[in-house]
Amino acid sequence: MSLSRVGRKEALKVQQHTYQTLLDVSKRVNWRIDDIIGGDKRLDFSKPFLPETFARTEALSFLSDRERLTLNHIRAHGYLAMFALVEGFILPFVNTAIAQDDGTPHRAPALQQFASEEEKHMELFRRFLSDFTASFGSECGFLGPPEAIRDAVLAHGEMAVAIATLGIEWMSQAHYVESVRDDGDLDPQFKSLLKHHWREESQHARLDGLLLKELAGKATPAQIERAIDEYFEIGAFLDGGLRSLAELDLDSFERATGRTLNADQRAEFLVVQHQALRWTFLGSAMRNKNFLAALGELGGSARARVEEASAMLC
């Protein structure tokens, strides 16, 4: 089957969902934070939290096995903090969509459920990050302030934010299904977090697809092309943050291990880890088949432009 035929098939599957069906599914899979964290449900720091496809610690030959595990945990801290960060701009985007209710049956309650789940996910990540900090033993830096990052993203057009949000939602789906679910070496508690997040984000990705379709239906081809331009602007902004995060992770690593890397080791660390972060949060979204199928439905060069740009992030 050709790539274009696969894309049309995936786009058709997304279109078959409605606000009603997604609301019904969301209510069935709903869970409580206290069901997955607290009491004896604790992170096991003797095991890795992230799969190597994201952490990419093995490429750093100057690290010991113990140091690689420490770096894996630091990267997992950043992984959770990054999702808490991006949901900080996804939530107001969804709230704006709720305020633009057009009377479509079940649209408002489906999006309200979406918003409430995003709020729950932000609290979930905060709880896990608190548990992490209490047990890890040293501080891990992260990007901020979150309000400034949120405002910088939301300064772009609504369709560009919708495209970025859709990529993030489909990315999180693929992360769990393709890299986490069947990895038996990972900490079960960390996997449980990502599993529960995945179960609800599955509906969110499809709701995002419906919102993007609404926006595209009101846009001209030139406006859609401009939205892709702005999507790349958002990506470039986030990539600058990922470069800074690699530097923060290096500081966190040296603080946690008590080891100071030499100049060559620091340079290699930053190159490897920045590229790992770029793939984790940008490249894996831009290569996602469901995301690309949705872009293909926009028409014009949207899909081709994103596929071409993704090559540098692989």
Image (tube, helix red, strand yellow):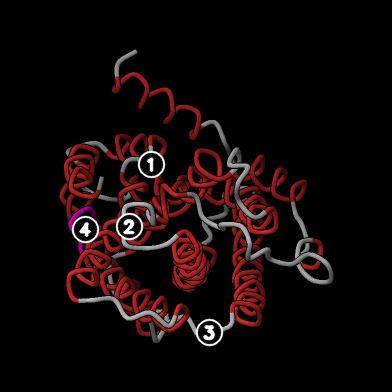
Measuring from the top left, give residue 73's x and y in whole percent. Answer: 52, 66
The first of marks 1 and 3 along the sequence is 3
Q: CA distance from mark 4 to mark 1?
A: 15 Å
* Residue sitting nearer the eye, 89 or 237: 237
* Residue sitting nearer the eye, 214 or 128: 128
Q: Which mark is residue 291?
A: 1
Residue at the image point whose x is 65% and y is 82% from the top: 134
Which residue is disc 3 drawn over?
Answer: 138
Q: Quadrant of the N terminus?
A: top left
The first of marks 4 and 2 along the sequence is 2
Q: How many marks?
A: 4
Do the residues bearing badges 3 and 4 touch, measured as CB atoms within 8 Å?
A: no
Instruction: Residue type at mark 3: give it.
Output: Ser
Q: Which mark is residue 159?
A: 2
Callout 2 environment at 10 Å: few (<14), some (14 to 19), or many (20+)? many
* Residue sitting nearer the eye, 100 or 13: 13
The range drawn in magenta is 228-233
Measuring from the top left, give residue 89's x and y in whole percent. Answer: 44, 71
Tell me if residue 248 comes above or below residue 307 in the rendering. below
Which residue is disc 4 drawn over?
Answer: 232
Q: Secondary structure at mark 2?
A: helix
Residue at the image point whose x is 54% and y is 64% from the top: 98
